[in-house]
Image: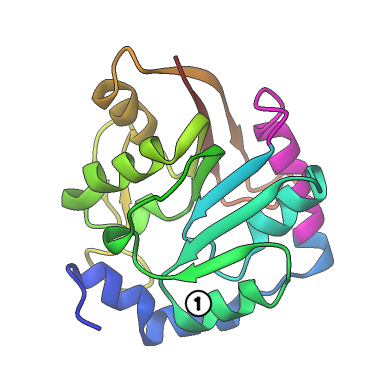
Amino acid sequence: MAYKTEQEAFWAGEFGDAYRERCALEPALVAARTACMARMLAKAAPVESAFEVGCNIGLNLVALNRVSPQTELEAIEINEGAARQASELGIANITQTSVLEFTPERTYDLTMICGVLIHLNPEVLPQVYDVLFKASKRHILLFEYYNPTPVEVNYRGHEGRLFKRDFAGEMLDRYKGQLKLADYGFFYHRDPLSWSDDGTWFLLEKV
């Protein structure tokens, strides 16, 4: 498949395969992410349906399913092996595709993206924001690295593969008058209950 950006090919290919193989749904990690999910979605309940952009092997889906077992779950994932692994969990409908090739056919109570925006080409962010916004009935959850101004960071020896910025602020500006900040927080990597890599989360709500 021909991709529009180098970043898509990077995550769909060998590096994405290696990343998937490094990930594992270990009980301690699942428990920690479940605690994080409960905190992030406290002001979003009830969530009857949710859609994730870039689910990898399904950690966030498992966590959300534990927090809210009745929630209908769907997701997209660019890496074929990761999409297959997430699908085999049997808790969500997974489509293997790039977000840049995806057009939402319905809306969900919640759309979420976790650790994906940071790895996208900054030029395509508006298109991804539109997917998150259009597919959401009420809430949008962003869980990413934060920086007040755009900055690129070397990622495992690779350039052009990790970018920090104020993703939530950009969405609030892009949909001014249509979105508001509902909640936000930070998970510190030394907190054994979060098992996070200094991630900042934002819960946005449609007005």
Whether residue 74 is visible: yes
Q: Residue at x 66, y 56 (%)?
A: 61
User: In the picture shown, does residue 158 fall above or below 131?
Assistant: below
Mark 1 Cα shell of 10 Å, populated few (<14), some (14-19), many (≥20): few
The quarter of the displayed image where residue 154 is located: bottom left
User: For mark 1, what is the residue?
Assistant: 19
If the image is split into quadrants, where does the N terminus sit? bottom left
Query: Up-down: is 204 above or below 6?
Result: above
- Label 1 is placed on what type of residue? Tyr
- Residue range in magenta is 30-47
**Vertical comparison of 89 with 31: above or below:** below
Q: How many marks?
A: 1
Residue in view at x 47 percent, y 36 percent: 136
User: What secondary structure is found at the residue carrying circle 1?
Assistant: helix
Which quadrant: the C terminus?
A: top left
Q: Main secondary structure of the magenta part?
A: helix
Q: Quadrant of residue 153?
A: bottom left
**Residue drawn at x 62%, y 39% as measured from the top left:** 187
